[in-house]
Image (cartoon, coloured by chain):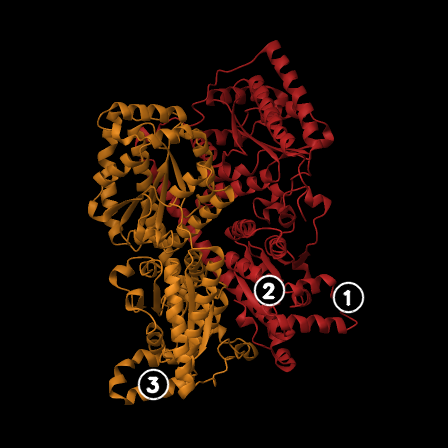
Chain colours: A orange, B red
Amino acid sequence: MFEAAELGRKISREDFDKMAPGLRTDLLDLQQKLRGTDFPVIILFAGVDGAGKNETVNLLNEWMDPRWIQTRAYGPPSDEESDRPEYWRYWRDLPPKGKVGLFLSSWYHHPLVERAYGRISVAEMDEKLEQIVHFEKTLADEGALILKFWMHLSEKGQKKRLRSLEKDPLTAWEVTPRDWEHFEMYDKFVATAERLIMHTSKGHASWHIVEGADSRYRSAVVLQTLKEAIESHLAAREVTKKVNAEMKGKAAAAKAKKAEKAAALATQPSILSSLDMTQTIEGADYNQALQEQRARLADLYRKAKETGTSTVLVFEGWDAAGKGGTIRRLTNALNARDYQVIPIAAPTEEERAQHYLWRFWRHLARAGRVTVFDRSWYGRVLVERVEGFCSEEAWKRAYGEINDFEEQLTQRGIVMCKFWLHITSEEQLARFNARGEIEYKKWKLTDEDWRNREQWDAYEQSVNDMVERTSTRNAPWTLVEANSKPFARVKVMRTVADALEAALGKIGKLGKRKKPSS
Amino acid sequence: MFEAAELGRKISREDFDKMAPGLRTDLLDLQQKLRGTDFPVIILFAGVDGAGKNETVNLLNEWMDPRWIQTRAYGPPSDEESDRPEYWRYWRDLPPKGKVGLFLSSWYHHPLVERAYGRISVAEMDEKLEQIVHFEKTLADEGALILKFWMHLSEKGQKKRLRSLEKDPLTAWEVTPRDWEHFEMYDKFVATAERLIMHTSKGHASWHIVEGADSRYRSAVVLQTLKEAIESHLAAREVTKKVNAEMKGKAAAAKAKKAEKAAALATQPSILSSLDMTQTIEGADYNQALQEQRARLADLYRKAKETGTSTVLVFEGWDAAGKGGTIRRLTNALNARDYQVIPIAAPTEEERAQHYLWRFWRHLARAGRVTVFDRSWYGRVLVERVEGFCSEEAWKRAYGEINDFEEQLTQRGIVMCKFWLHITSEEQLARFNARGEIEYKKWKLTDEDWRNREQWDAYEQSVNDMVERTSTRNAPWTLVEANSKPFARVKVMRTVADALEAALGKIGKLGKRKKPSS
């Protein structure tokens, strides 16, 4: 795989000086064009120590407009970072649309080094590589341009390069004992790199292997590749936009046609219609049950905190189903410094400039905390689907993206409960009307609520699909019969307490959660 | 995940009879439309025993035109099949373009059952699921419509269903002790199925979960889903065709523009230009070396045969580089019943109706044999790339597809060597001219040879990229300096012998290759 990167390719200073000004102007022009686009550029550098990763990043920073470029390099995770799922730190560093992000020692570093040192098996490495593929695919599916450069040196070349860096007093500090240790393991690193490149070179994010021995040659190749990639991505995005518009038209036509579906299929019960909506709990029974669950919860979440177990609660439901009131009853059992309620409304400007999952990643709390999402990432497959805010392809893809996201949380030991608060259409109407009559509740009722109500059937179908596609063992949906608010509150609190109890029982057996290796 | 498939949805006979004729006509019409298209339809059925997989397949066979539909079900692999990589049997059963293939107990069966019985770990199952994802993606990327139905029954529902099948003398034979054994493991199967569906539900091949308790309901859902999926795939293919045409135009424009690339980059050495083309071996030295390698090869391949180790040899190279003569010297060392030479020319009609990798899968020999490909699947990234026979996206994707393919062969223990026979441009010209002069060699020289020669630089770039992207530890490329035919022949034979020796050395340590579990 690396044979073609050991040919001794080089460029003379004269030739380089001849091509440089044109290339530099082109890149600056492209950067201006990028600013108006709806995608970020993500550039990764990895490879053999001494093959010019840092130098190339420096050159890019020098040549391009620094206001639209950001560089990120990673060492061992900070306290903040090890308290959260592994990818949290990469998500928060993603460049927004229109900007360029340069990454050093990124998500590839850990699997490469751990495998080369034999600290993880081939199967474990493959699993990490698959996770990377999913991560990059998720970004690319939303339009990100991802470029990955593997800077290569032959074994001889690396030795020579490290020696020459050591000789120069200006660069001697760059060569660490670890570099020489890695050099001794050259074969292992190269064999691991081969597998890494093979498994993660995908159409949406392929590797470019660059011969790193000559600084002018490798600079020229990276810059030229970057230029061509941005140009062709800009062209491809235009085609994509046209296609999406066309597909949207076809989808609308198909939707109109689908109304033809036989009544026998269209009128089947949904998962919501199967709920027993008469369930209720009243008066003293309610108070007693509420106090019981509150006490359980207060006790269990403290124990969870001690073991570093976080809890993520997701609330979705019909307008006026009582999400707010339920969340307040629940958080009453918790200490204010231990939980956060994140109300999800329209995204901010900063959030709109990122992948739709970014704004949820950023709110993930440190280990031991409780995070309550009042509405959530499920907006993608609910309101965005029903209102056509995103393409059919995008919301269908979202089920997988959401499962990936939640798997990363639960694998990190986070306890997850997701609630759909269900009320009947009649109950909603009654509540809407009541709100309209009570002065201090009027603000809660908006035109949007009425519009959403007209889409009841479409939402019901979406909820059905959502539960089918995203209710999993570790992150199950609980459907809550909420015509009776007291019943709903008690059921939610009991469900959370049960989940915590089960998780603590497992931890009790396995011992305290280990810190992830850095 | 399965909650929504336990709602007791059903359709009355009356309602079903009302919707059936229309649906049936629609499906027959669509089948006619499919015949003219450039993609196959692949429909998979999996799920809980007794949930109606077989019945649904029977219904589809009854309702649709049997000439354009084929059904495949799999039991334990045959001798023929266990002698080859696992997916060989699925590849050979793929429906050609325009046809519908129904699959029962397909590639999902093995990972599901093995995991439910605890015979493989979660990580091993995940690896198998990733392989499935790659397989289906490879097919979908070339246009295949893939539909996967998971037929579900609740635990109670399954019990009831098996009981009722047993009661009816007409169906009692369908219920085996294994069905009851699986029923006892219901929870394990469902937990495994959840992971399976979560990991393999992709945009290009998503699962449809079908409530299987009522035969009319499940039939109606499958038929309706099938109809809608074919309709929307037909529409999407039209858009894709338009996009491809547009992208092709852009690619041509970009190609013309790329000529601007700075000379300093355009004139870098390639992996071919770095070869020492003066190497030669002559006269008695040649004869002796040839005899030596021939004897080694004859001995080693017989030992390989005893251990069930197959060999796959791939020959690519410039026109007139001497592939044929080299192959003949090599096969001289082998017994005629143990090897096959597969010359790859333009695909046959049957082959054109399949995925481009299909025709290579079909030629894989049984364990212990030697298969020599005179040209190969690398045509995709050589001639098809250079001549524009496939889109840029398609040949770029091919590197990954080829790596996947070869990984399946080498994982099965197949020894693989790939040769690029290199001659200089001057040598080729001399050989062309000589061919033109010798009467009995004239037939070998075609106009196409001269046309290919004009594309020398483009081919050189393609070979360079090919080696960079597909030369791996287990399936390495060997570049053969072939200006001297004798030198090339000896080098090829020595390389094959060395590879066999290394593989036999490993087997010697590990014991004879185990038969794969069925």
Q: For the residues tagged 3 and 1, is the chain the same?
A: no
Q: Nearer the viewer, mark 3 or mark 2?
A: 2
Residue B162, given in percent of the width and then of the height, sits at 70, 70
Residue A372 visible to an observer of this rendering: yes
| Dot 3 crowding, Cα within 10 Å, few <14, some 14–19, many 20+ | many
Identify the residue shown where x is 49% and y is 64%: A472
Contact (Cβ within 8 Å) of mark 2 with mark 1: no
- Asked if residue B429 lies left or right of residue A27, the reply is right
* Residue kind at label 2, given as amino acid type: Asp
**Amino acid type of the residue tagged 3 in the rendering:** Phe
SS of the residue under disc 3: helix
Separation of residues labelled 3 and 2 (CA atoms):
43 Å
Asked if labels 2 and 3 touch by Cβ distance under 8 angstroms, the answer is no
* Chain of the residue displaying label 2: B
Which residue is under mark 2? B187
**Looking at the image, which is closer to me, B93 or A259?**
B93
Mark 1 lies on a secondary structure that is helix
Cα distance between the residues tagged 3 and 1: 58 Å
| Residue B320 occupies quadrant | top right
The answer to whether tags 2 and 1 share a subunit is yes
User: Measured from the top left, where is residue B443 in percent x and y?
Assistant: 61, 27
Mark 1 lies on residue: B173
Chain of the residue that carries numbered disc 1 in the rendered image: B
Sequence order check, earlier mark of 2 and 1: 1
Image quarter for residue B305?
A: top right
Q: Quadrant of residue A459?
A: bottom left
- Labels 3 & 1 near each other (Cβ < 8 A): no
Q: Residues within 10 Å of mark 2 (few under 14, many from 20)?
A: few
**Quick one: label 1, few (<14), some, or many (20+) residues within 10 Å?**
few
- Residue that badge 3 annotates: A432
Looking at the figure, which quarter contains the C terminus of chain A?
top left
Q: Amino acid at mark 1?
A: Trp
